[in-house]
Structure formats: structure tokens, C-alpha cells
Image (spheres, rainbow, N blue to C red):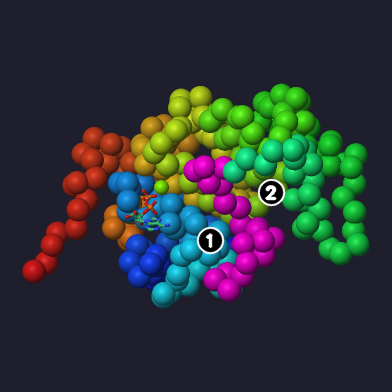
């Protein structure tokens, strides 16, 4: 099955349960959006999928094409085709974007196989043209002194070069100006294809004005409480998240 399937996932930090029985499945060729109020656990979900060591999975499973990835290191998950983009990308002074991407691609080749430099640059420039990224970008240090929009551009370029089967983009609340939003949206729209499944995490409906998702899920207190199509995002925008608060049973 070509999908990421999250089954009854439970995650704790310092003995506090943050994700409390979450179910979600997305397939190649689909764009799913997760929305939800601050603190509902959206970024925690992204980090757990990436394999962040601070989070303890206490129950459930995450399956990539039918196989659990929970015991895999972050690099192994990446090699299996999972790409995670973070809200706050790290800066790597002294390492150029081009060299960073080269090293990332080289790391995926079998032992003893060398990445062809000419082919690499051809591919890099072709992707940069598609994403409308200037050539000077290749020689700048990874994310150092980048604006919010430039960091996002870089993230999308990384995704374009790695050609993941599944991508999780955590585009939460803070720091996304309209420029950055457009960059993410244009990039995602250009990379959308039957070969990639995209999970887009966002606090605000406005990103979904630019990227029309196939499915929308609402996360609330560590669970998916509603799923629907793009209309659900519009409904949330007009009624707010309070309308989704689960009814307390006494
Ligand atoms: P969202 O991305 O939906 O805003 P988060 O996943 O960032 O939500 O946070 C969910 C909850 O988990 C919050 O209550 C937050 O305070 C808590 N949390 C997240 N990361 C940590 C951490 N590293 N240590 C302690 N608590 C955390
Ligand atoms: Mg977040």
C-alpha cells in the first residue's frame, strides 16, 4: 500500500501525553492538510514522524508503505522516502546550499557509487528554474542570514532535489509572511504529482487559499476530531475551532 498510515498513535513528553490516539492515512498523489489550534500537537506529530529523540511513542504505529518506521533512525526514514520540513529550519554556516544538497544525495547512493557532478548541477539548475530560484542561491551558506521566505524556498528546493515519496511540511502559525506563504504554496503546487503524498500542517486557513488540499483534518488535543474536504477549512475559518470542541461526557 503506497501510503503513510498512522494508527492509534500515542506520544508523551516528560510523562505528559500529547498525542492521544491519532489515526490518519495519506496516499501518494494526495495532499492532506492538518489544521488545529495552538498546542493541539501538530508539530509534535511532525517531529515524531521524523524520529525526534525527545518524544516517546507509548502506543500505536506509523507505517510507511505497510512497514513500521518507529524503530528507524531519522536518516533511515529519510532514505525510505520520507521528507520533513520544519517550522524553524537550522542554519549551517560555512556549508553552501549546493554542497549540502550534494552530500544529502550522495548519502543515499549505495557504497562506492559516486554522484556525477555534471548531472547533479544539471538537475539542481533545472529544479531551481522550475521553482524560480536565483543561481546565486547555490553558493550561499545553508539558511544563514536567510529571510523567512528564503528559508522556505530552500526547504522546497531540498524537497525537489530529494524527490521524497512522502513529505510532511509543518507551516505553523508564527513567522510566515505572505511572501513565504506564496513560496511554499507555489513550490508545493509545482511538486504535486502522483509520485508524492503531502501532509501540510498549518494553523491558518489562508495557506489553503493557495494550496487546495484533497483532504482536511482537524487536530484537537492530540487527536483528529474531524476529517473532510477543502470545505471543512472554510467552515473552520468562519466558525473557529471552538465549534469543534468535543462535547464533554460526564
Ligand atoms: P502545535 O504545533 O499544534 O501548536 P505542539 O505539538 O507544538 O502543538 O505542542 C503540543 C503540546 O505539547 C503543547 O502543550 C506543548 O506545550 C507541549 N510540548 C511540545 N513540545 C514539548 C517539549 N519539547 N517539552 C514539553 N512540552 C512540549
Ligand atoms: Mg506547531
Query: On residue 163, which mark appears?
Result: 2
Q: Residue at x 33, y 66 (%)?
A: 16
Residue 243 visible in the displayed image: yes
Residue 31 visible within the image: no
154 w.r.t. 245: above or below: above
**188 horizontally vs 10: left or right:** right
Q: Position of residue 57 (x, y in %)?
A: 45, 71
Assign the N terminus to one quadrant of the image: bottom right
Q: Quadrant of the C terminus?
A: bottom left
Q: Residue at x 43, y 52 (%)?
A: 43
Q: Is residue 241 above or below residue 6?
A: above
Q: In the displayed structure, would residue 233 be above or below residue 186?
A: below
- The reply to whether dot 2 and dot 1 touch (C-beta < 8 Å) is no
Is-magenta flag for residue 74?
yes
Secondary element type, mark 2: loop
Magenta-colored span: 69-89
Q: Residues within 10 Å of mark 1 (few under 14, many from 20)?
A: some
201 is higher (above) or lower (below) than 250: above
Q: Residue furthest left?
A: 250
Ligand 1 image position (quadrant): bottom left
What residue does disc 1 label?
52
Alpha carbons under labels 2 and 1: distance apart: 22 Å
Q: Secondary structure at mark 1?
A: loop
Which quadrant holds residue 9?
bottom left
x and y, in percent, of residue 196 in the image? 61, 51
Q: Earlier in the sequence, mark 2 or mark 1?
A: 1
Amino acid at each position: 500500500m503506497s501510503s503513510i498510515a498512522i494508527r492509534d498513535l500515542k506520544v508523551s513528553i516528560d510523562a505528559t501525553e500529547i498525542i492521544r490516539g491519532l489515526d490518519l492515512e495519506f496516499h501518494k498523489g494526495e495532499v492532506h492538510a492538518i489544521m488545529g489550534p495552538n498546542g493541539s500537537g501538530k508539530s509534535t506529530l511532525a517531529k515524531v514522524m521524523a524520529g525526534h529523540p525527545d518524544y516517546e511513542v507509548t502506543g500505536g504505529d506509523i507505517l510507511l508503505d505497510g512497514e513500521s518506521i518507529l524503530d528507524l533512525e531519522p536518516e533511515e526514514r529519510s532514505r525510505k522516502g520520507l521528507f520533513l520540513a520544519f517550522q524553524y529550519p537550522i542554519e549551517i554556516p560555512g556549508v553552501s546550499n549546493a554542497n549540502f544538497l550534494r552530500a544529502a544525495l550522495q548519502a543515499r547512493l549505495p557504497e562506492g557509487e559516486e554522484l556525477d557532478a555534471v548531472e547533479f548541477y544539471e538537475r539542481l539548475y533545472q529544479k531551481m528554474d522550475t521553482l524560480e530560484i536565483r543561481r546565486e542561491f547555490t553558493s550561499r551558506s545553508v539558511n544563514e542570514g536567510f529571510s523567512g521566505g528564503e528559508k522556505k524556498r530552500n526547504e522546497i528546493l531540498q524537497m525537489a532535489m530529494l524527490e521524497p515519496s512522502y513529505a510532511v511540511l509543518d507551516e505553523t502559525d508564527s513567522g510566515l509572511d505572505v511572501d513565504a506563504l506564496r513560496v511554499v504554496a507555489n513550490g508545493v503546487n509545482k511538486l504535486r504529482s502522483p509520485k508524492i503524498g503531502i501532509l501540510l500542517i498549518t494553523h491558518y486557513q489562508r495557506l489553503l487559499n493557495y494550496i487546495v488540499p484533497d483532504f482536511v483534518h482537524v487536530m484537537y488535543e492530540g487527536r483528529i476530531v474531524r476529517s473532510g474536504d477543502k470545505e471543512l477549512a472554510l467552515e473552520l475559518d468562519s466558525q473557529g475551532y471552538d465549534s469543534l470542541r468535543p462535547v464533554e461526557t460526564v
